[in-house]
Image (cartoon, rainbow, N blue to C red):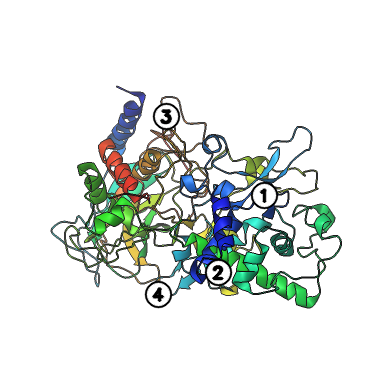
Amino acid sequence: MTSASKSHLVITALTAVVLEFVLLQPRPACGQQLVSSAHVNPDPIVESVFDTLAFIRWTTQNPGGTILHFAVVHYGNDPKHLDLTAESPTRINPAHSDMIFRVRIDNLLPGTTYYYKVSSRQANGAVDSAPNAVSRFTTTATNPMSAKQ
Amino acid sequence: MLEAKALAAANSGKLDPYHQVQTLGELEIFDPNLSVNSNIACSYCHDPMAGYANGVSILSVFTGGSNPGSVPITVSGAYPNNRIAKRNPQSYTYATYYPPLHYNQSQADFYGGNFWDGRASGYRLQNSSAHQAQGPPLDTQEMANPDSACVVWKLSQSAYKSFFETVWGADSLEIAWPSNVATICSTPAGAASLGGNTTPVQLSTSDRTLSNKDFDEFAQAIASYEGSDSVSPFTSKFDYYLAGSATLTTQEQNGYDLFRGKGSCNTCHLDGRSSTLLGGSDTGQAASLQPLFTDTTYNNLGLPKNVRLPWYSEDTPDQWGFTANPLGFGFTDLGMGLFLDGYYGAPPDLSWGVLEPKFDGKFQTSTARNAAQVPYAGFVKAYMHNGYLTSLKEVVHFYNTRDVYPYNVLSGHCPEGTIEKVTCWPMPEDPNNENLTIGKLGLSPEEEDDIVAFLGTLVDGYKP
């Protein structure tokens, strides 16, 4: 096995061991529509998590609107107070029926559980419909092989 | 070679007006006399054999593709020993097809312009590539003329002076030059002796107006050449494929399918496909038969700082008393954010200034056309604004795995057990506004290779 693949396995293993993904609120909030499609998975997943960094990903139908969108994650240590926000620019491909949103969350505390929910908006501020469930993940303990930002 | 051929054509008297302008631009681009020390031409950093990008392999390896400019640094022990630009020179193939920089209100995004950071907005001439052509001749790190009038004076001394006047009008270059013009025009831009004066050549008001007009026309001729069949001909294999006279190989076709599918490359590198929401995969036919493979927008891809850029060491005064980068390694290249924040002076539209936080770290999406063009097998080509990536395989692998192997280190400090650019991507130079359309595409190594193969079909000069 190459050192490259070993490193990848380390990251994957850490993610698998530590990651907790629990759907706490399966139904959309009043006034918001859950995006549904046979070929999309609207539930956000933790793509990867490190000691101080996490990537959240979810897929919806192509929301249209501006090409430039912002994927948004509201997060915090208390599921009732998601006071922190991370957002990442993402461009939609008009020719694709689906849209993958991803957010990079930096400056997390190692070994800490965070709760989050996701949304997205167009570059002009218009909000897309999006899944609204609160989920959670736990960062890894400090590890020299993991990334932090 | 090319300039001799162009000069012969110019002197033949047989060119129609259309080709006269283009030929004039070609003569200008290959003329080293237009630099302060008469030692570098535009083409030295924009090599035709490398897709009009950096054409010196060893520079791709050691300086991020950034080329030495016209001014040597003679201070004892100085590194670098030449003024060098802060970025990898951007190819100018198809640059004339980029519209003037504008903020699209409905998209809430910038489109067009030239230069990695968009500062060649083209606002005055409504021609961003002409605006770009006016940059390097006056850039302290490049051709370093202290005054645009110096470029015009050198044109008036050139072998193609009469041809310039054939194109732009009789007596266009008849200006009453001061007796010290040669002395002033051999003083590099930024020299302390100039006292910050950017128009040190003393001209009458009417001559200054004429000189400014000449400088505009000098640039417009270059833009014309950049848009010519010599530079932007739409003759790649992919163009013939769209025309129905070439067939992609299986690997190229796989790469193309990935380019507009799983790889999401054509989200920004527009390939001209239809944009109808079909549901499922895109089966539409090409809506444009000469796609530019760029949407001309700006993105922060999260590239690591390229510590090999000599720019970071240009933090002490040269023999002219000029310090290019007082911040040294502390300099953060914010790309368009620098432009909007006034690094080069106030942006032409003052309302753009407030947009700066949203555009920090963003650089222009270059056309993918001719990205694969190299002068010879084994040539190392620098990619991206800072030349951090040195092969198309690395480029595609970066897009594919940036967020799979993110490490909080500078380049050169990846942890033991990892391989930089393979299983370790150092932290972004500027994490703000990082584009997450890419970063974890889930491509296999073979699929990466397929995309690279497809990019090879975008090199001009294909013979069907």
Number of other residues with Cα within 10 Å of mark 4, as a class: few under 14, some 14 to 19, many 20 or more: few
Identify the residue under disc 2: B122
| Lower sequence index among marks 1 and 4 | 4
The foreground one among B88 and A145 is B88
Q: Nearer the viewer, mark 1 or mark 4?
A: 1
Would you call the spot at circle 1 few (<14 residues within 10 Å), some (14-19), or many (20 or more)? many
Q: Which mark is residue B419?
A: 3
Q: Secondary structure at mark 2?
A: loop
User: How far is the residue under mark 1 from the one under mark 2?
Assistant: 22 Å
Instruction: Tell me the residue that label 1 is attached to.
Output: B141
Chain for disc number 1? B
Instruction: Look at mark 4 in the image and give the residue it sits on.
Output: B106
Q: Give the x, y percent position of residue A92.
A: 31, 61
Number of the front mark, 3 or 1: 1
CA neighbours of label 2 inside 10 A, class few (<14), some (14 to 19), many (20+): many
* A31 displayed left or right of B30: left
Q: Amino acid at mark 4?
A: Ser
Say which chain tag 4 marks. Answer: B
Q: Is residue B44 left or right of residue B154?
A: left
